[in-house]
Each structure stands twice: as C-alpha cells, then as structure tokens.
Image (cartoon, rainbow, N blue to C red):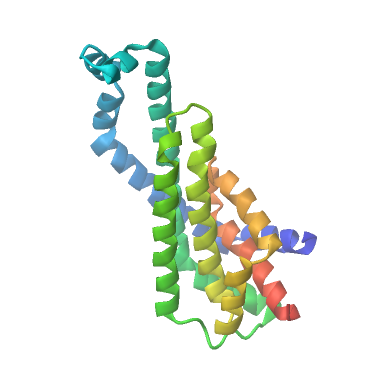
Amino acid sequence: MNSIIKRSFRDFFTIRFILLAFLPLGISLISLVGLTLYFGDDIFNILAKSHLDAYANGDGFIAWLLSLSLIQFMLTSSFYLISIFLAIIFSVIIAAIITGFLTPYIVKFINQKYYNYNTTPSPSNARVFGLICVTFIKFILIFLITIPLLFIPIINLFILNLPFFYLFYRLMLIDVASNTSDSLIFEIDLQKGGGVKFFSASVVFYILTLMPFLGIFLQIFFVIFLAHILLEKNSRGF
C-alpha cells in the first residue's frame, strides 16, 4: 500500500493531472453557483421560521406538534444541515461525472507507465451502463428507506451518508474497474467489491468528498489511487 500511496501522490502532483483536477472543480463550482442564484431564495423561504409558525397556528395534532419549540428546532436545523449536505453532494456528483469522462485517459496513462496490463477484451458499454442503472435504483431504494430518520438531529447526518456512500463506492468501482480490467476480471472485481484495499480507500475518499472544495479537487487523485490498487492486483494475477 505504501508504494501505491507514493506513486499516486507522485502522479497527481504533476502539471498534467493538477491541470485536469481544476476541470471538475471549476465546472462543479459554476454549476453550484448557478443553482444557488436560481433556487437560493426559494430554499431560504421554505426554511423560514414564519412558515412553521403558520402551520403551528392551525388545528389538529400536527399543528400542536409543530408549535413545540423543540420540534421547530429539530425541523429547522435538520433542513439547514440536509440542504448544506445536499449542496456539497451535488457539487461532488458534477465533479465525479466530469472525472468519469477522464477516467479512461487517466487509467491508460497509469497502466502504460507502471503495469502494461492487457485489459482486452474490455467490458461492454451495455454491461457498464446496466450496472450504473442498477446502482442508481438501489441508491434510490436505500435513500427512501432512510427518509424517516432524516429529521432526527445528529443521527440524520450519519443516516444520510449511507445511500450516498453506496452510490459513490459502487460508481467508483464500476468506473475504475471497467477501465483497469478485462471483462472476466471486471466481473470478479464486482463480486469482491474491488477488495479490502479498494473499499477502505473508498471510505476515506468519501469522507474527503464531504470537505468543500477539497473533495472536488481530489476527484482525479481518487481515480489515480484506485486505478493503482486494481492494476497492481491484476498485474500480479490475484
């Protein structure tokens, strides 16, 4: 693992990849600013306390529940935290999509420089697209299951990360493995989840993605590091 870390940092801190790292960063920030300009006022109006007070002044059990200060605090704080979290995730998703188009180029460079591993026959585009669709369906199902827990302060931050980590991890695995493996090894990688090293690195990288700007900027590094893990494993024959 130490050799992978050294190689990954050495590769990333080159003009080639540093410049590439600014591409997803720039596009995701522009998208986030545009989203804020168009929908920012609507989001803050929804979060306004006056809306909760209006509902609380009504009749019935729900109105009584919303009239409680503790419930109002829980709802308001949860809305703010979830909104900030989703804004970060949205920018990361945009960056990840842009990085996904760069993955073949990155992996090809890494493979030619260190491993010269034969990745033919490559997994079919139909197979990869199908796996991505299945991943999004499972992500939506996991997200729907977690919805009832999203309005519990503190707990909601942990629960909300479950579906998004699953999405991040599986898409990274599909994206990187489909470019570092032939069709047979690709299926094995999917069954094994990329292995312990791949999963462990994905956990650390997901945590980094939650750090504004840093997680977006390091998307290229994530691909480089994960590519090294799989290419080293494949070149050794296990």
For image coordinates 41% across by 36% down, the residue present is 148
2 with respect to 108 (left or right): right
Q: What residue is rendered at 54% in x and 37% in y?
A: 158
Residue lying furthest bottom in this view? 121
* Vertical placement of residue 49 versus 23, above or below: above
Residue 130 in the figure: left or right of residue 45: right
- In which quadrant of the rendered image does the N terminus lie? bottom right
Front residue (pair 91, 158): 158
Residue 230 screen position, x and y as percent: 65, 70
Taking depth in this image into account, of 30 and 1 the one nearest to the observer is 1
x, y percentage for residue 232? 71, 73
Q: Is residue 185 visible?
A: yes
Q: Up-down: is 176 above or below 217? A: below
- The answer to whether residue 216 is visible is no
Indicate left or right for 153 with 30 as reference: right
In this picture, is 103 found above or below 168? Answer: below
Number of labels in the image equals 0
Picture layout, residue 159 above or below residue 190: above
Of residues 204 and 145, the one drawn nearer to the viewer in this rendering: 145
Q: Where is residue 112 in the image (x, y as percent from the top left)?
A: 64, 79
